[in-house]
């Protein structure tokens, strides 16, 4: 999945979580359930980001896919 799709999914998940939190503020009897669901959507967003960025190393010069060191990229060029 490309970066734009991941960020779009994360945006959607966080929007849904926000709607659950807003609804919880107006429905005190269902508050705990709604906040639990909001937490689940936030967790989905974080999981999606971790899965995407977990496939990259973060060296001093920028992002590179795991398994590719700087020397291997020079040799490939």
Image (cartoon, helix red, strand yellow):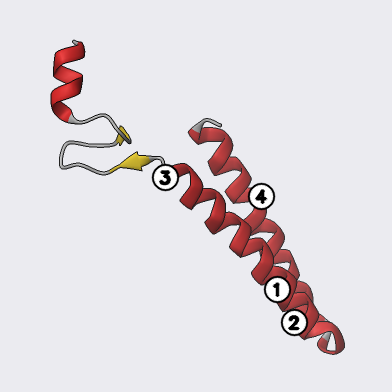
Which image quadrant is residue 39 in?
bottom right
Residue at the disc numbered 4: 12
Query: How packed is label 1: few (under 14 Cα within 10 Å), some, or many (20 or more)?
Result: many
Counting residues from the start of the chain, the first of labels 3 and 1 encountered is 1
At 33% from the left and 36% from the top, the residue drawn is: 66
Query: How packed is label 2: few (under 14 Cα within 10 Å), some, or many (20 or more)?
Result: some
Counting residues from the start of the chain, the first of labels 3 and 4 encountered is 4
Q: As displayed, is residue 14 above or below residue 38? A: above
Q: Quadrant of the N terminus?
A: top right
SS class, disc 1: helix
Counting residues from the start of the chain, the first of labels 3 and 2 encountered is 2
* CA gap, disc 2 and disc 4: 20 Å
* CA gap, disc 1 and disc 2: 7 Å
Residue at the disc numbered 3: 53
Labels 2, 4: front one:
4
Q: Nearer the viewer, residue 70 or 43?
A: 70
Question: Is the C-beta separation of discs 1 and 2 under 8 Å?
Answer: yes
Q: Is residue 45 left or right of residue 75?
A: right
Residue at the disc numbered 1: 21
At 79% from the left and 79% from the top, the residue drawn is: 33
Residue 41 spot, x, y in % from top left: 67, 62
Query: How packed is label 4: few (under 14 Cα within 10 Å), some, or many (20 or more)?
Result: some
| Numbered tag placed on residue 25 in the rendering | 2
SS class, disc 2: helix
Which image quadrant is residue 59 in?
top left
Which residue is situated farthest in the top direction here? 77
Labels 3, 2: front one:
3
């Amino acid at each position: 999945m490309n970066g734009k799709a991941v960020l779009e999914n994360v945006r959607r998940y966080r929007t849904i979580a926000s709607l659950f939190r807003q609804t919880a503020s107006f429905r005190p009897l269902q508050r705990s359930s709604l906040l639990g669901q909001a937490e689940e959507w936030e967790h989905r967003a974080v999981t999606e980001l971790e899965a995407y960025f977990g496939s990259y190393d973060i060296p001093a010069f920028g992002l590179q896919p795991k398994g590719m060191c700087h020397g291997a990229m020079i040799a490939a060029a």
